[in-house]
Amino acid sequence: MSVDTRVDLGGIALRNPVLTASGTFGYGTEFAPFLDLTKLGGFVAKSLTLEPRQGNRPARIAETPSGMLNAIGLENVGVDAFLREKLPALPGGVTVIASVFETEIERYAEAAKRLTGSRVAGLEVNASCPHVKSGGIEFGQDPALLRQLVAAVRRATDLPLLVKLSPNVTSIAAMAEVCEGEGADAISLINSVQALEVDPETRRPLLSNVLGGLSGPAIRPIALRMVWQASRAVSIPVCGMGGIASAEDAVKFLLCGATAVQVGTLNYLEPSLAGEVVEGLVAYAERHGVERLAELTGALETD
């Protein structure tokens, strides 16, 4: 049986629905020794700001039960260095989605404008990073600010536009509707969950930033719930993520309404995992007589 793995993510044609998540896959070349990047649907590059950014001081990462807590602070080389050095280093045939983050709406729009016209297939607006002291989470939690942000970036680029939403909100459906209303082509969710861990011996937080973002299998049920709610609220595609550790996990997200998925934290443990998820999805489809992986999207039976 030949399985059609192709999906369309808001105008981005993907050879299969498996991407890797921003902040967990570097700029792509770091993972080339571990898997064939052209076999993935694509990858979302590390979030970019207009100028290079150092991020937070150590400690910036800590292990938690079934997960990871991080407060990297969006360290990156900046948009211009990405276009000049990182993007040309990638082999042809690799679908690249650029992630953009800033602290002001005008700067988000400028970053999007600079990336337009390059080989990136689309943009993911990081409106939800929970571990910086300004920007990010404010946009992701405030519907009015989110509306202004999406509208400004939409005006700045004709590239397919995804908006990465925060789970730290009362209604994920309402935030998804804001994005759709302002012209987003798809939404991504969820980003990490704001969290805190403490060392009882030192009586200090494990992270220098105090708060960080919790990711990994611990948050998967939260992510599935939010993908299901968001996909029922909007007609644009949803890209789901949060603790995917296997093809079976990816299937869960598709059934809950995701058109595509992103593998994130588990890349640190198994650098080749995303490729294995692609193979596992095909095997699942063959076992269940599914001709097109797109048929799984929203096929959750709740009656």
Image: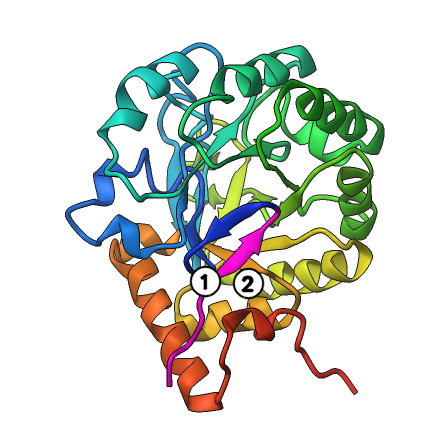
Q: Is residue 168 visible?
A: yes
Tag 2: residue type? Arg
Q: Quadrant of residue 266?
A: bottom left
Residues marked 2 and 1 touching at CB (< 8 Å): yes
Quadrant housing the N terminus:
bottom left
Residue beneath disc 1: 244
Say if the magenta span includes residue 9: yes
How much space separates mark 2 and mark 1, taking CA atoms? 7 Å
> What is the span of residues highlighted in magenta in the rendered image?
1-10
* x, y percent for residue 263: 42, 55
58 sits to left or right of 174 = left
Which is nearer the eye, 243 or 194? 243
140 sits to left or right of 255 = right
* x, y percent for residue 251: 51, 73
Secondary structure of residue under mark 1 = loop
Residue 64, labelled with which disc?
none
Q: Eyeballing the image, is 55 above or below 161?
A: above
* Tag nearer the camera, 2 or 1: 1
* x, y percent for residue 184: 70, 38
Q: Eyeballing the image, is 99 above or below 274?
A: above
Tag 1: residue type? Ile
Question: Of callouts 2 and 1, which one flags the residue occurring earlier in the amino acid sequence?
Answer: 2
Q: Residues within 10 Å of mark 2 (few under 14, many from 20)?
A: many
Question: Which residue lies at the image location 48% right of the left edge and 21% below the top edge?
Answer: 115
Question: Which residue lies at the image location 56% right of the left edge and 21% below the top edge?
Answer: 112
* x, y percent for residue 267: 32, 52
Quadrant housing the C terminus:
bottom right
Say if the magenta span includes residue 12: no
Residue beneath disc 2: 220
Q: In which quarter of the image is residue 232?
A: bottom right
The majority secondary structure of the magenta stretch comes to: loop
